[in-house]
Amino acid sequence: MIVITAPTGNIGGHLLSRLLESAPAHGERLRVVVRDPARLPGAVREYVEVVVGSHGDASVVDRAFDGADAVFWLVPPDASLTPEDAYSGFTGPAAKALAAHGVGHVVGVSALGRGTQLADRAGLVTASLAMDDLIAGTGVAYRALACPSFFENLLEEAGSIREKGVFTEAAEADRKAPLVAVADIAAVAEGLLLDRSWSGSGSVPVLGPQDLSPNDLARIITGQLGRPVRYERQSLDELRAGLVGYGLDEAFVQGVVDMKRAKDAGLDAGVVRTPDTATPTTFEEWCARTLKPAVLS
C-alpha cells in the first residue's frame, strides 16, 4: 500500500497519474489523503482508496498510514503560519503516525541546501530541512527529494508576460541555477516508491537538465512566444512589501525573503549535476507545452 499526500497538487497529481498506470504491475494498492475528494477525477476515485481530510491532522494520518508500506509526503506551505509551524508543526502528527504504524519507507519533497553554509539561514528551506530531520528521526527509511526552484513558478507570471512582456524575480539576472519540472520530480518519486530496496535516510537531488539564469529564461520565452520578453529584478524589500500586503504571516514572509536571499547567494549550487541527479525535461520543452498556452490563453 502506497499513500499519496497532496494528490491534487502539481507534484502529487503527476505522481498519482503515473502510479495509477504502474502500481498494479507491481502489486501495489494506492491510498490518497485529500481534503476535497471532488477534486479527484471520477475515474481516479474508482481505483484508489480515499481518506478525507488534512494530512496535518492526527486522526487523518492515523487512518491513512494504517497498513501502509510507503508514503509520499508533501507539505503544502501555509502562509498563515510561521515556517516552523508550516513544515515541522504540520508534519508532527504524521511523524508519530509513521512510527505507530511501522511504515517502512517515506519519500518527501524538500529542498537543496543541506550541508552548505547557507542552510541554517535560508528561511523556508531551513524549515524544510528540519522537517526532513523530523521524519528521518522516526526510524523510517527516508529519501528527501532535494529540489531547486520549479519551472511552474513562472506560471504566476503568465499574466505579466502576456500584458507587459515582463516577468520578475529576486535573483541576479545572470546568476545560473538549477531548475526542474514538477513532472520530473514525480517521476523520481515514483521510482523510489515502487523499488523500495533502499534503506536509511538521505537526500536525492533532482536538478533538471541544466542551470539557467533569469536572462536565459527570458531569451527562451522570447523564442517560444515570438515576441520580446524581458526579466526585471525585484528587490527583497519590494518582495517583502508585496507579500505582507497580501496578508501573509510576517514570519512566513521573512522565510520567503531569507530563502530568496540564500538562493541568490548560491544555496542551490552545492550539488554537482550527474546523470543520476539530472532530469530530462528542458525548459524549452516545458515552455512550449505549459507556459506558452498559459500566456496565450
Image (cartoon, rainbow, N blue to C red):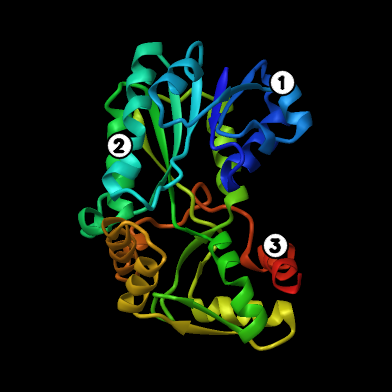
At 60% across and 65% down in the image, what residue appears?
A: 155
Q: Is residue 69 visible?
A: no
Mark 3, residue position: 290
**Which residue type carries mark 3?**
Thr
Q: Nearer the viewer, mark 3 or mark 2?
A: 2
**Which numbered marker is on residue 89?**
2
At 32% across and 75% down in the image, what residue appears?
A: 236
Mark 1, residue position: 24
**Which residue type carries mark 1?**
Pro
Q: Does residue 214 appear left or right of residue 191 in this picture?
A: left
Q: Secondary structure at mark 2?
A: helix
Q: Which mark is first along the chain, 2 or 3? A: 2
Residue 84 percent across, percent down from the top left = 27, 45
Spatial CA span between label 2 and label 1: 34 Å
At 44% across and 22% down in the image, what residue appears?
A: 61
Residue 52 percent across, percent down from the top left = 56, 25
Residue 55 percent across, percent down from the top left = 46, 30
**Which residue type carries mark 2?**
Gly
Do residues under tags 3 and 2 come within 8 Å of each other at their CB atoms? no
Q: Secondary structure at mark 1?
A: helix
Q: Quadrant of residue 100?
A: top left
Residue 192 percent across, percent down from the top left = 53, 32
Q: Is residue 249 visible?
A: yes
At 70% across and 67% down in the image, what residue appears?
A: 294
**Which numbered marker is on residue 133?**
none
Spatial CA span between label 3 and label 1: 29 Å
Q: Which class describes the residues within 10 Å of circle 1: few (<14), some (14-19), or many (20+)?
A: few
Q: Which class describes the residues within 10 Å of circle 2: few (<14), some (14-19), or many (20+)?
A: some
